[in-house]
Amino acid sequence: MRRLIALACACALLAAHAFDAVTPGRALAFPRDRGAHPGHRIEWWYVTGHLDTPRGAMGFQVTFFRVRNAAAEGQPGRFAPRQVIFAHAALADVAARRFHHDQRVARALEPVVEAREGETAVRIDDWSLVREARGYRARIPADGFVLDLELEPTQDVLLEGDRGFSRKGPAATQASYYYSEPHLAVRGTVRTAGAAIEAHGVAWLDHEWSSELLAPGAVGWDWLGANMDDGAALMAFRIRASDGRVLWSAATWRPRTGPATSFAPADVEFVPVRRWRSPASGTEYPVSMDVRVGERRFHLEPWLDDQELDARASVGTLYWEGAVGIEGGDGSRGRGYLELTGYAGALGL
């Protein structure tokens, strides 16, 4: 009897810690799904953009992560780290050939540290990304730079994958809910070396949430989000194994006018063109790429080679996240961000 009681208690505990599933057919709804989904294991709001300033071109990244820490869910009190919030920010100053980055991590403790449900409102102390009347506001007083940017939507939400259900591996359970907001109009200020600089430009926002880890054998991914100058939008990624095999890939292409097209793994290809070795970590990254999506081909060149982020003090990894210029095989041009993970070692959660 005692064994049965113990087994029942263990099953109840596991059930209490079960993460919400990602299943096909769930319709994303707004503004609800702009907010947090605390029943899922991991979630992120990810903004990348390109700025024109009197000091020249700059690229920026602002990312907030929410992680459900099931191990703490049995702990009493509001200070238990049941939800943990991470944030990364970076600024690529092309004219100065400088790359700045910073990071934060804290347990959720409303209203100081939170990922709010129902609408985008994520913050760690004085770092925040909040949905306002006309769009989003990012305020990031980081170490060595400050971002204060307004981001206004100019296009409809782009649902990735199958109406927002995005496969990430061979198994159907290896998936996320995923939407993007391309071509956000950006204006605001950047501060470096004590000087405030007026800036305007274009940005891309991703919001993604999931409860699954990467497929067995996966070490990381390559991801691209691109705002084309003619108003088209491109998202593409591949999941890599330790031996270089591609375990999964997908892409979405949306012209300025007309519906989006999703592409299956056979239609997506990343080909390294040039590699750069980080003098700080010794990690080698394929910072220049050729990308094929269906019949379309694109060449990517980084604005700066050195855009490596050392996030070992927060999420425990090194990765490359950089502003890139894009040239299509048809002569089209654009600006995007390329993310390269798993090159310094397999990603963990």
Image (cartoon, helix red, strand yellow):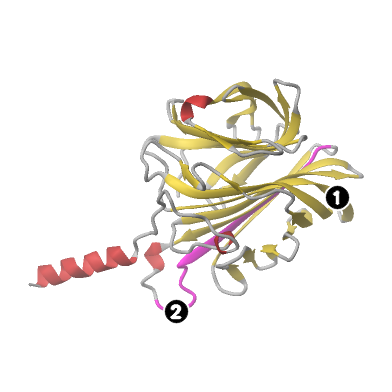
For the point 43% across and 50% down, the residue is 25
Question: In this picture, is 265 found above or below 176?
Answer: above
Mark 1, Cα crowd under 10 Å, few <14 / some 14-19 / many 20+, is many
Residue situated in front as seen by the camera: 128 or 102: 128
Give me the disc on residue 199.
1
> Which residue is the site of mark 2?
77
Report the Cα–Cα distance between label 1 and label 2. 44 Å
Q: Is residue 15 left or right of residue 142?
A: left
Q: Amino acid at mark 2?
A: Gly
SS for dot 1:
strand
Rendering coords of residue 189 (x, y %)? 84, 55
Callout 1–callout 2 Cβ contact below 8 Å: no
Where's residue 106, x and y in %? 56, 64
Q: Secondary structure at mark 2?
A: loop
Q: Give the extent of the magenta segment.
A: 76-94
Q: Foreground mark, 1 or 2? A: 1
Residue 342 in sight: no
- Residue 272: name its quadrant: top right
Q: Residue furthest front?
A: 258
Of all residues shown, which one is farthest toward the right?
54
For this orientation, the residue located farthest to the bottom is 77
User: Callout 1, which amino acid?
Assistant: Ala
Which residue corresponds to the image point at 62% horizontal and 63% vertical from the top-left?
120
Instruction: Please tell me how many numbered marks the rendered image carries.
Output: 2
Determine whether 230 is above or below 103 in the image: above
Query: Where residue 219 appears, x then y in whole percent?
Result: 45, 36
Upstream in sequence: badge 1 or badge 2: 2
Rate crowding at label 2 as few (under 14), some (14 to 19) or many (20 or more) other CA atoms within 10 Å.
Answer: few
Say which mark, if any, is on residue 340. Answer: none
**Would residue 300 be visible to someone looking at this image?**
yes
Q: Give residue 111's position: percent from left, percent from top.
A: 61, 74
